Image (cartoon, rainbow, N blue to C red):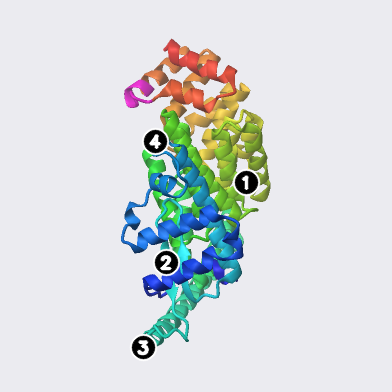
Amino acid sequence: MNQANDLLIDQDVEQPSPELVRQALRGVVSSVEFRTSPRLQQFLTYIVEETLAGRGAQIRGKAIAVEVYGRSIDGSGGRNLVRVEARRLRRLLREFYEEHWDGKGVRIFVDPGGYKPRFSYEPSGEDPNSDPRTRSQTRESRHLRQLLLIGLAVLAVIAVLGTWLITGNREVQESSNSTQQAKRAALGQHSLARLQAANLADQARGMFFPVFDVKRQQIALGMFQHATELDPALPDGYAGSAQVLATLALLSRDEENRDDLLLQALEMSGMALDLSPSGAWANASNGWRLAVSNEPDEALKYARLSAELAPKDGHVLDLVGITALIANMPALAAEVSNPARSRAGSGRFGARNIWGVSQLMLGNYENVVEAFQGAPAAGAPVSAPSLIFQAAAHDQLGNFNEAQRLIGELQKTWPEFPSEFLVERIFPSDQKTRETVLGALSRY
């Protein structure tokens, strides 16, 4: 494995001296990778020097826009430029260390979500500043960690084999669980922090539904962001962050805030695709971002590709399905959410909702009622949108009393729910379905 991609957060590191940091900085900015990017040289130098001066916590995009790029302090244009440039800076840093990093000395990180740099330091055996006793303790600690990782891996493998021997070769879901356990064991052999990051991202992706629960999305975003802090080389944290940021943009009424969220989602999806160009989650997340950004044709390209890359991954299929709904392609949404389709992992509840909405768009109103009425019995959460879509279907079927009852339940349980706003956001290009749902809301 390329040492540049190893997780340095999990190593025993000392805090480097300012002189060692500046020495590492000089090596970066004078490299081939940075030689043709004087602005990024200035960007990196500015944030490193500010951090060494004790002002790292005060580094803001507005200050970088003024000090490095000479932009006006007013407006958001300068801050948007800084976000785009920060993404370029992280990419160049990654390219530099992939080419030149030997695992020793100072390494500079600029983690997503901020501009304050972070430094790791691994003394070389010849480093005159390193203490021999510290080196001995570090080697001993590393040896103990390796033994611990091997032990954990063995236990994980035993658990997988034990489960297989007891239960036999079962259906797709159980086979997928065993595969996931084996993957976790492999990650644990590499780094405990990497394993923790992967577990955290996996837990957070199960929180995608209900999509319209803003607080739930914000919690998931925090989990994904923490995963990127634990392992900057793991694409899942970036893919998850992009998916949630795009979702929050969809739900935002403030146009400036929406644009800001989409810019952040663009940066995160770019990181995910840089790290995993053929990753199904990275491609699906980018497709969702494009759909929310009103780029339906591009969104569907990424959606279809991700469905081909992971045709049974429940979470990926949910992202494909909801992307297809926003992009006005209900047939694709129905295809990936069909109850008869085999799927594994998270996505059980989301698929039911996506199937129901796809049937509403296709005019199959009996299927809409069946999908949403069966949700509570299946353990799926009941949400305001599910009541709205059921009411619209009953209204089209002539079941006016039931439609009225459902709208009454919506108004009683979620009196502040922005129904009309979200209908406009979910069906931006589907005028027929939009009018069907808004008509039902206005009649009862």
Q: Are marks 1 and 4 in contact (CB under 8 Å)?
A: no
Q: Which amino acid does the dot numbered 4 rest on?
A: Asp
Which residue is under mark 1? 342
Asked if disc 3 and disc 1 are in contact, CB closer than 8 Å, the reply is: no
Q: What separation in Å lies between label 2 and label 3 (alpha carbons)?
A: 22 Å
Of the residues tagged 1 and 4, which is closer to the observer? 4
Q: Few, some or many C-alpha atoms within 10 Å of disc 4 (few <14, some 14-19, many ≥20)?
A: few
| Vertical side of 441 occupied by 12: above or below | below
* Pick the front one: 73 or 242: 73
Taking the image as shown, residue 231 lies to the left or right of residue 305, namely left
Disc 4 to disc 2, C-alpha distance: 32 Å
Within-10-Å neighbours for mark 1: few <14, some 14–19, many 20+: some
**Nearest to N terminus: mark 3 or mark 4:** 4
Q: Which residues are magenta?
A: 410-417
Kindly give the residue lying farthest to the front in the view shown.
70
Q: Quadrant of the N terminus?
A: bottom right
Label 1 sits on a secondary structure element that is loop
Image quadrant assignment for residue 335: top right
Foreground mark, 2 or 1?
Answer: 2
SS category of the residue bearing label 2:
strand
Label 3: state its secondary structure.
helix
Give the residue pinned by disc 3. Answer: 133
Residue 244 is situated, as x and y percent measured from the top left of the image, at: 47, 43
Q: Nearer the viewer, residue 394 or 165?
A: 394
Residue under numbered circle 4: 74
Which comes before the other along the chain, label 1 or label 4?
4
The residue shown at (36%, 60%) is 51
| Magenta-drawn stretch contains 411 | yes
Amino acid type indicated by mark 3: Arg
